[in-house]
Image: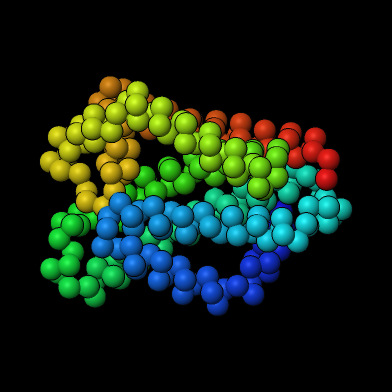
Amino acid sequence: MRHLLARDLRLLAPYWWLIVPGHLLWCAQSFLTPELYFWMSLAAALGWTVAILAIEWSLDTDRFVASLPVTRATSVRARYASALGGLALGALLYNLYGRAIMAVAGGERLERWHDSPAFASADGIVAFLVVGYVLVVGFLPFHFRFGLPLGASLFSASAGVVAFASVAVAGLDGPAGHAAAVSGGAPAGGGVSEVIRGWFSLMFDAWGSGVAAAMLVAAAVTLGLVSVWLSVRFYEGRDL
């Protein structure tokens, strides 16, 4: 797996001169719109995985990877490790870029962030990781079953339906309003982080912090294990 992860780094090496300043510019331009900064930073973090998969697809490297002296299951696990590592790095940059820009930008231009920007709060970072994690473990089984173009299209359609249904059933104001009532105001910088914090607050109030935290960890681990199992099964059964 270590060699496969190193291969990912080498695969993107020729593009670092474009990725690094592009990522910084992308995030800086969206900084003054809190919700946009959240989604643009998340897109940049997930773009690591998408870029690798797009390069592999354009070069048709699936057959080459399958010919290596590693199992397909190992290749799948390496892809998950790479994607989650990119997400963790993206969360770190989400925080650091935000703090750096906040330090140099004029105070009058930061009114929308108020005194509690999401990128500087634990809630905002958790929201970033939760949304990114769900997208990663949801997308990769589609990729390993159908390949990049069709898999990405089917995942996008499915994710849109699920997101719409979730908003329609649960509503966005309930959890966000609960979080604001509990804490005296949700952090500026993301309706998403406010909603997720609201759901966490509801769970903690209903079951207690210990039980709720254990349930969240168990749900994340279960979701990840099921996703990896599906991806391995799909990839091993796929004719390359």
* Image coordinates for residue 240, horizontal then vertical, percent: 83, 45
User: Is residue 224 found left or right of 70 in the rendered image?
Assistant: left
* Image coordinates for residue 83, horizontal then vertical, percent: 57, 52
Which image quadrant for residue 155? top right
Q: Determine the residue positioned at 83% across, 56% down.
A: 64
Q: Is residue 182 above or below residue 101?
A: above
* Image coordinates for residue 171, horizontal then vertical, percent: 29, 28
* Image coordinates for residue 68, horizontal then vertical, percent: 84, 55
User: Is residue 19 found left or right of 95 in the rendered image?
Assistant: right
Q: Quadrant of the N terminus?
A: bottom right
Count of all numbered marks drawn on residues in the image: 0
Here the colouring is rainbow
Q: Determine the residue positioned at 17% across, 73% down.
A: 106
Q: Nearer the viewer, residue 19 or 180?
A: 19
Q: Determine the residue positioned at 33% across, 38% down.
A: 196
Q: Nearer the viewer, residue 71 or 196?
A: 196
Which image quadrant for residue 99? bottom left
Q: Is residue 225 above or below residue 56?
A: above
Residue 77 in view (yes/no): no
User: Is residue 238 found left or right of 46 in the rendered image?
Assistant: right
User: Is residue 240 found left or right of 146 in the rendered image?
Assistant: right
Q: Nearer the viewer, residue 222 or 60?
A: 60
Residue 165 in view (yes/no): yes
Q: Is residue 81 above or below residue 154?
A: below
Q: Determine the residue positioned at 43% across, 54% down.
A: 42
